[in-house]
Amino acid sequence: MRDDQILSVGIDLGTSTTQLILSRLTVKNFAAAFSVPRINISKKEVIFKSDIIFTPLASQTQIDADAIKRFVVQQYDKAGIQKQDIQMGAVIITGETARKENSSAVTQALSGYAGDFVVATAGPDLESIIAGKGAGTNELARKHRQNVVNMDIGGGTSNLGLFSDEDIIDTACFDIGGRLIKIQPDSHQITYISPKVQQLISELGLDLKVGNTVTTDQLQPVINVLTQVLENSIGLGEKSPYFDLFITNHALHPENEIVGVTFSGGVADCLNDDLPADEFRYGDIGLLLGHAVRHSSIFKHKTIYPSVETIRATVVGAGSHTTDVTGSTIAYTDGILPLRNLPILKVSKSDENLKASDLGNKISEKIDWYRVQNELNNVALALVGKHSPKFADIQRYADGIVMGAKLLIDKREPLIIMVHEDMAKALGHSLYAKLPEHYPFVCIDSVKVENGDYIDIGEPVANGEVLPVIVKTLVFG
């Protein structure tokens, strides 16, 4: 078996910062001679970590695409590589930056700098998943056999991803971050206040506004509220009257017990016991917020685990392609293939065992994770399935999928189902009977995927018996 090496890049445009990572991936074909190739990554080496810059903005509503392209070119030069050397990668836009008017245009403008790449504008739920995996929270949950939540506190939002035995079971997002108030480091003059914080300031009756010089003591009431909401977000303390104000999309479900906590994002590097003398050196309230979180009830009542990454947690190390083929028990409608760049939504093992109506509710709830700016794009639904399913199991899966995917079906999006176990043909036949007439769908098996992956599905081969699939795994650096 011959090893091949490929160069991969990840570019992350966040609320506060923009950065990239270059990785060298070693891929190996593990299949026997004369067999269908089965390629996996055998080694991943991060060879370059870029400078971290504040995400350049042309205005409060526009990303400065030209400045970002200049930054990428500069970092490629610094790393000593040419853009044509890049074979694959990913461009991810997260946080407040995903809400900018030209976010989609920026990802397309960078397409020539990331090889055969995945482009994703990550909504708050997907960002929670990405950040949690980047921080290593999923591995901690599996290792310690307990529910562990990652709190990714960035510049504009705090994204929560709750993991149980490596599965993501819940997400949440709050409009809390280090750059909700921007302050000149030298003059201590306020240059920006986010709308929600402005509302909070008005209700608290504080004398804080753009143009004023400010002290730590004057800001402390705001910091106290933000910290209390973060405590509340994982079930601690008396509920703040401002809790609902700062919810971005939804809170965590209270019935899920949380034992451990990890932190990522820029504020994770500011969890200091003592506040430094130059508390405004980053031009925002990040150091104040980090100091307050460090002394909050989170550290007193939860097990705090170290993160693999903090500020770089959502940088995608590589969009690594794993070539695979489906099993032969597949079902699909003519004219649907090929499909490209579909994000994976993997249903947790515990959800798969629910009755059809409850399974449908879980699927519907999690499909909504992929909504960005109130726009829902298609996803591929992944399940483990059962090794020897009964007819009742097949029917229950089909009923739950059709109920849960109603939002996509109403939009006439092709229904994409991936099952790890060998049951796709039977499930596909059942789906065909329950879907609207001539509805486009594909149901495939024997391909292993995870949340955070993207897939391409090619046109049928071997007389239509199997489908080539590219699984693009976002490997976090």
Image (spheres, helix red, strand yellow):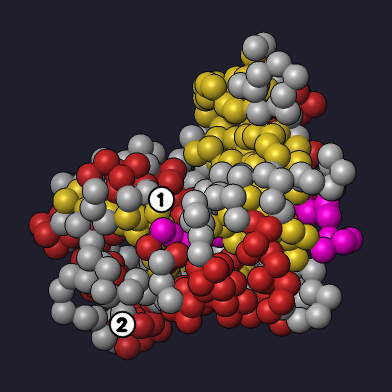
**Residue 275 appears in the figure:** no
Find numbered disc 1 in the image and state the secondary structure of the residue it sits on: helix
Depth-wise, is mark 2 or mark 1 nearer the camera? 1
Q: Nearer the viewer, residue 363 or 432?
A: 432
> In the drawing, does residue 90 fall left or right of residue 198?
right
Is 415 placed left or right of 440 in the picture?
left
- Residue to which mark 1 is pinned: 132
**210 with respect to 307 (left or right):** right
Q: Amino acid at mark 1?
A: Gly
Residue depicted at 54% across the width and 22% down the height: 42
Does residue 352 appear in this view?
Answer: yes
Q: Which mark is residue 433?
A: none
Give the residues drawn in magenta, as a range.
333-349
Q: Which residue is rendered at x = 55% and y = 68% of the image? A: 391
Task: Classify 382 as above or below 211.
Answer: above
Identify the residue under disc 2.
Answer: 242
